Amino acid sequence: MMTNKTESNSDKFSNSTELGILYKLELEAVGECLNADPKDLVQLLGYIHANQVPRRRVCGMLKIAVSSLEQLRECQTDLFHLKDMKPEFYTLCEKVKQTLETGENFSLTGVRQALTDICTYCIEHSCKAETIARILGAQALASIVGQNFERAAELYEKAASAPRLDLSSQWQYQNKRALALVDLGRDYADNAALELAVELFETTIAALASQDGQQGHWVQTQSNLGDALGILGHRHRGTHILERSVDAYGQALSQIDRIKMPLEWAAIQNNFGNALGALGQRKGEKELLEKSVAAFELALEERNQESTPDDWATSQNNLGAALHSLGQHGEGTRLLSKSIAAYTKVLKVWTRKRMPLEWSAALNNLGTVLRVLGERQSGQRSLEKSVAAYKNALAVRSHETFPQDWAMTQNNLGAALQKLAERVDGTQELEDSVTAYDNALKVWTREKMPMGWTMTMGNLGVARRALAERTRDITIARLAVDDLTLVTEFFRDASHAQYRELSEEQLTKARELVEELRN
């Protein structure tokens, strides 16, 4: 199994000021969402930054770290409430408390050492299994805070193996063990960790859930199994793993009581919709996409903007994506209009100040649906809205901060402007389209992203040919020929017959234009 780099032994980062500046957007967003202490955030960010994760994952990982630190502090408080312990135990607990304080006293190294001392003390004094397991669980949380998920999984396994521990507690710690592996697999692209988590959910954890007689544990096991399989399914070709994910969610939904656990039921419906949507895209089956839409709509019967705004926005966003995919299977505009309505609702919660990355992603997706809708309509209003949405998204997706997302949105903007240019006079839209495609190619190079580079280069060539037709500029027409020649050669070498024929057709038109302008 690949480990997630290293768990830093340094608790003070000399570049904390630089980190605060570099990740200003993420720190402000997480602070706004979770009301977390800025000093804690910078400290936690240091552990994440040390592992060189993709920037787009930083916000989500920072939220997990904040939650884990809060749980760790709650565990520390609970230790003081344990009865019938000797004074030495509470003295060790005081060390944990001191090293967990926000600010200069915070020391993850100190926390780990103090918890190790407490665990040793409890083993030597034959403390209850529940107490030893609780301390091992606290050690696991400290490892998660420090981004060492593999070590956290090992500690949860030890906690579950504490002698004479009851079945329900064994399930709890084994489940946390597997969830730590899921976090490792998701955030650090460790498929081996995900596969181990899947194995645990299907064997050890499922067996414990059946033995302890708690239906909620069985439902949660199946739901967590669906999550792990869903992540793996997106990374592997084929449909088998995604089908297993769908089955796991279906099992969970067949047993959960919606009346008693409405929000948990809604969460599983939401994830069920994601799995169905991914499977429908992979298989190209309209029926699965329709089931995906239905699942999100069911989730939204329990999730509302007033009481669960973030969950509501998440399901609205997923619904928008599913409606967009389903809408592409037909020729009408009804489903696309519903998709636009869903994304518009999302932006009521995912604001630029509170959730800037999600806000920009929703705007990018909204722009894409508006562009598709505009292509099916005769007017230009939807295309103008599409251009505006992409430009707003670029307010957060900058070249310096999020280069890949910036390139994607620049490419999308170029496509929207190119389509809009067909509906209006003049050359401004085509000129702006060429600029947007050129921007995307600054990141999507032939060496790093050959297919993305080729598709964008093809779009650029077509846009330049259209611009040359309007301006009667032979220099621009020759640039279009150069662009499309490169694209045709790429598809010829890569044996993409369909794309090669299309690029050859566009290249012929560009060459004919050059001859026309020359004469």
Image (tube, helix red, strand yellow):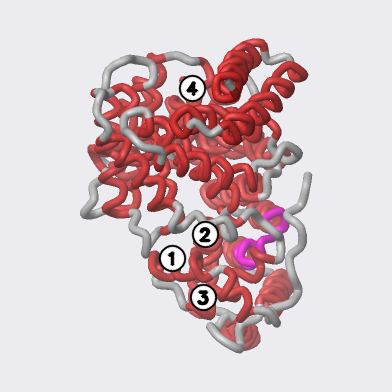
Q: Which residue is mark 3?
A: 82
Q: Which residue is mark 1?
A: 29
Looking at the rendered structure, the kind of residue marked 3 is Leu
Amino acid type shown at disc 1: Ala
Classify residue 418 as left or right of residue 464: left
* Vertical order, 26 against 466 (above or below): below
Could you say where residue 137 lies in the image, as x and y percent from the top left? 61, 62
Q: Is residue 148 magenta?
A: yes
Question: Along the polypeptide, which appears first: circle 2 or circle 1?
Answer: 1
Name the quadrant containing residue 197.
top right
Instruction: Give percent across and percent down for residue 312.
Output: 30, 46
CA separation in Å, label 2 and label 1? 8 Å
137 or 465, nearer to the observer: 465
Crowding near the residue tagged with mark 3, few <14, some 14–19, many ≥20 C-alpha atoms within 10 Å: few
State the residue position of label 2: 59
121 or 291, which lies in front?
Answer: 291
Residue assigned mark 4:
281
- Gap between marks 3 and 2 measured at Cα: 35 Å
CA–CA distance between discs 1 and 3?
A: 37 Å
The mark nearer the N terminus, 2 or 4, is 2
Whole-percent x and y of residue 458?
Answer: 59, 28
Residue range (magenta): 140-151
The structure residue drawn at horizontal position 26% and vertical position 53%, both measured from the top left corner, is: 348
* Lower sequence index among marks 3 and 2: 2
